[in-house]
Amino acid sequence: MIWLPVLVFLCSFFIFKPNYKNLIFGCFILLLFFIKNLWTFGYPVFPVAIGDIGVSWKPNPEVLKISSKYAILKTYDMQYTYEEIQKFSAYDSIKNWFILDGIKSKINIFFILSLVAFIAFAIIKKKKIITVICISLLIKSALVLSFSAQYRFFIDVFFVIFFILLINFSKRNSFVFFSIGSLLVISFLSFPDFIRQYIPSFKPGSFMAAFKKEQLYKPSVYDYNKFETFRIGNLKFNVSKNYPFNFNTPLPAISQGYILDDVEAGIFPQYIDEKNIRKGFIWKPLTEDEKKKAANVINNIKNTDK
């Protein structure tokens, strides 16, 4: 959502009458943002590892490297190895992003075409507010493309562009476009079997359930209370069974993916004080004995998934 504060900042200087007193509240919110990141992540600007003040709960450097590699792999929908991506030329990086197998390439192409169309629209309209919105979206898009160009990070750009275009249409045309678009989205989400069959590359479709009439008057509840308990070092933790996420698994719970990342990095979370969980956790290097236990945990998880 970085484009929103950028938009407000640009508007305060180029559209509205400058009032520096109004920036005080904005700076206060920015300060809260930095404090929140320091408290939860250990660095003031998530997820960039800059501004290290040496707090004990910051992520392990090896975990950050693994996360960075994973972000690059996700950019190309895991269709290339990290070594292959590192060998891409600038041209290959762009070309391969556009020709990914499945729906992701279509979304990527549509994203770039939408930005080009919006730039042309801003130039034609010559309105300051539209130009500033366009610049804000371009800044956000440039940051996303430079870090991890996954569609989930730039999908909000589509909504902003469509909103600006619709308010410049007639009310009738906007209503028709909105109604048809809403029906298409609702239909798309209501029939996951269609998605799984015809758009198998849309991975969230594998987690979606079919629409039921009871949902109109009774909220759907999904209860999945299957888990296994393991212990590494002084930490006894739970892992959801045959499922990648933990949402009603008893705490402390660790997702399968994070266990693999931690073990690969040679570290694992431990209680600061085993007798007082309120003191929290800290990562510590795995001993040889703990590495063997961690390997057994991973083997157990993989065998269970089979």
Image (spheres, grey):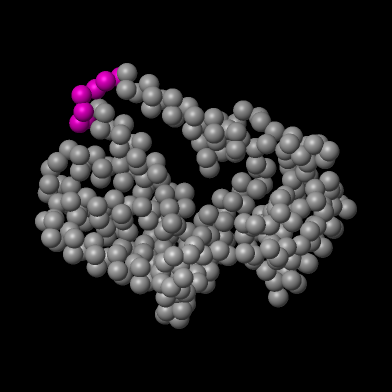
Q: Is residue 151 magenta?
A: no
Pinpoint residue 113: horizontal percent, then vertical percent: 27, 60
Q: Nearer the viewer, residue 271 or 214?
A: 214
Most distant residue in the right direction: 289
Residue interval drawn in magenta: 14-20
Seen as rendered, the residue at the extreme bottom is: 197
Report whether 174 appears left or right of 224.
Answer: left
| Residue at the spot 58% in from the left edge and 65% down from the top edge | 222
Residue 129 showing in the rendered view: yes
Identify the residue at image location x=33%, y=52%. 157
Main secondary structure type of the part rendered in magenta = loop
Which quadrant of the rendered structure holds the N terminus? top left
Indicate the position of residue 132 as horizontal and vertical percent values.
24, 39
> Which of the 4 quarters of the picture holds residue 170?
bottom left
The residue at the point 36 percent across, 36 percent down is: 5
The answer to which of 64 and 275 lies nearer the viewer is 275
State the image coordinates of residue 294 (x, y, percent, origin top left). Answer: 80, 57
Examine the rendered structure and indicate whether residue 168 appears above or below residue 210.
above
